[in-house]
Image (cartoon, grey):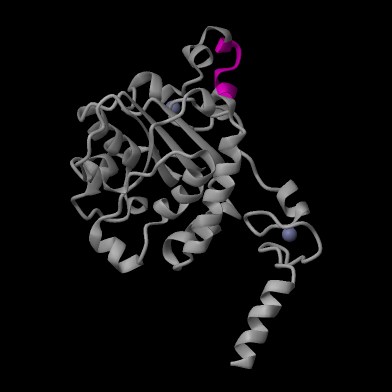
Amino acid sequence: MVDHWLKNSLNFCLPQACLLCGDTTSRQHPLALCDSCIAELPVLGETCQRCANPLEPQLERLGNYLKHSALLQTRQCGQCIRIQPYFDHSIAFFPYIAPFNNFIQAAKFKGKFATARMLGKLMAQQLSNSINMLDNRPDSLLPVPLHPSRQRERGYNQSLEIAMPISNELKIPIFTDLACRITATPPQTSLSLKERKQNLCDAFHIRGNVAEQHIAIIDDVMTSGATANALAMKLKQAGAKQVSVWCFSRAEPPS
Ligand SMILES: [Zn+2]
Ligand SMILES: [Zn+2]
């Protein structure tokens, strides 16, 4: 009993160690990182406005043709220009590399839902600084639903944990009952792009009223965009006016 009390008191009094280097001296951040680790965190460069795919590698390949490219005019990647996704706009904040991929893996597969909340806090901070976002506020947030069997197994939905601090900070309601996942799909990471799309066809069902609404889908990581696109398709079919995607991290799409 005394041990327990002492441990709790010490945890409260002692500065928290940085998750990456163990430093306890500098100011703490929502991700429990020290100032110098924060300064070295990898960032996403310019991204496609539609799907948040990094644009820089494509801009480099285009070279001299840059001035005439639709890519430059629309700030959309080649893939979105060829086949427009159902969602209208995406924001991602960090590349899916260390340390962010480790945070997401911990939030998803290691039961660390507190880490998911920290990712949400960090996203909320970034979003509240975004002028574009404030000009175009969604009516509600929709965390990507998990199939009930996976949610039971995991005990929580990491996308909902991420959405909560965003909802608190930006005062946008979360509607968890707006959509449900009706088919249990195998993990997307093991599949090719074509298989991902096939796999997600009819995975979601919209059961709330979304007519004329602007919905922001909240997810931890966007890879091919197939999950967000399948959900956005259903939202648009149900009458949603606009669908945005806000995700913590952007991974390289599979080829
Ligand atoms: Zn550190
Ligand atoms: Zn794109």
Q: Residue furthest top?
A: 68
How many numbered dots are placed on residues in this image? 0
- Who's the residue at 35% across and 20% down the image? 82
Judge from the rendering whether residue 69 lies leftward or rightward of residue 153; answer left or right. Answer: right
Q: Quadrant of ligand 2?
A: top left
- Who's the residue at 62% across and 33% down the image? 129
Between residue 160 and residue 147, name the one nearer to us: 160
Q: Is residue 63 magenta?
A: yes
Q: Note whether 79 is above or below 185 in the view shown.
A: above
Image spot of residue 183 (x, y percent): 19, 52
Q: Which residue lies furthest to the right in this view?
A: 25
Q: Quarter of the image holding residue 13?
A: bottom right
Between residue 207 and residue 224, name the one nearer to us: 207
Per the picture, the main secondary structure of the magenta-coloured stretch is helix
Q: Quarter of the image holding residue 173?
A: top left
Q: Quarter of the image containing the N terminus?
A: bottom right
Q: Is residue 251 visible in this depiction of the protein?
A: no
Image spot of residue 149 (x, y percent): 24, 63
- Who's the residue at 73% across and 54% down the image? 37
Judge from the rendering whether residue 183 lies leftward or rightward of residue 29; answer left or right. Answer: left
Q: Is residue 116 visible in this depiction of the protein?
A: yes
Q: Is residue 166 magenta?
A: no
What residue range appears in magenta? 59-66
Q: Note whether 46 is above or below 72 in the view shown.
A: below
Judge from the rendering whether residue 94 lies leftward or rightward of residue 87; answer left or right. Answer: right
- Who's the residue at 32% across and 22% down the image? 83
Image spot of residue 255 (x, y percent): 40, 38
Between residue 30 and residue 185, name the one nearer to us: 30
